[in-house]
Amino acid sequence: MKSSDRNSKFLLTHREREVFELLVQDKTTRDIAEQLFISEKTVRNHISNVMQKLNVKGRAQAVVELIKLGELKI
């Protein structure tokens, strides 16, 4: 297994993936928090962590990158 394969498999935590799957369904931070039984602050932290991992500036850019990497389906 190439290191790039290994990295992409573990790019997102399970929770980060759940948050972004809901985000692409056009859910608000509040909707996501309620659905996952976490606080809105925690949702924002997950999104922020993913944006840092991807070195992008916004949610939309993060979604685009995750789709490119095959981490997210729409």
Image: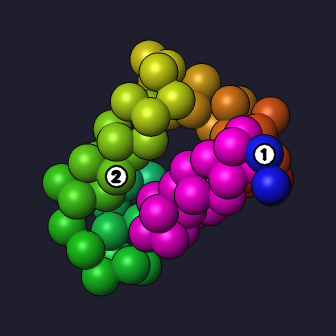
Q: Is residue 38 left or right of residue 35?
A: left
Q: In this view of the protein, which residue sits in the foreground, 66 or 53? A: 53
User: What residue appears at the point 52 percent right and 29 percent down from the top-left corner?
Assistant: 54
Q: Quadrant of the N terminus?
A: bottom right
Residue 25 horizontal/vertical position (percent) = 66, 58
Q: Amino acid at mark 2?
A: His
Judged by its main secondary structure, the magenta piece is helix
Q: Is residue 59 left or right of residue 9?
A: left
Q: Is residue 51 left or right of residue 73?
A: left
User: What residue appears at the point 29 percent right and 47 percent down from the top-left corner?
Assistant: 44
Q: Is residue 63 above or below residue 54?
A: below
Image quarter for residue 73?
Answer: bottom right
| Observer able to see residue 26 | no
Give yes or no for residue 7 being in the magenta stretch.
yes
**Badge 2 element:** helix
Q: In this view of the protein, which residue sits in the foreground, 58 or 55? A: 55
Q: Residues within 10 Å of mark 2 (few under 14, many from 20)?
A: many
Q: Residues within 10 Å of mark 1 (few under 14, many from 20)?
A: few
Q: In this view of the protein, which residue sits in the foreground, 31 or 3? A: 3
Give yes or no for residue 17 being in the magenta stretch.
yes
Q: In the image, which disc is placed on residue 2?
A: 1
The residue that label 2 is drawn on is 46
Residue 6 horizontal/vertical position (percent) = 67, 53
| Observer able to see residue 10 | yes
Q: In the image, which disc is placed on residue 38?
A: none
Q: Amino acid at mark 1?
A: Lys
**Which span is picked out in magenta?**
3-23
User: What residue appears at the point 80 percent right and 34 percent down from the top-left corner?
Assistant: 68
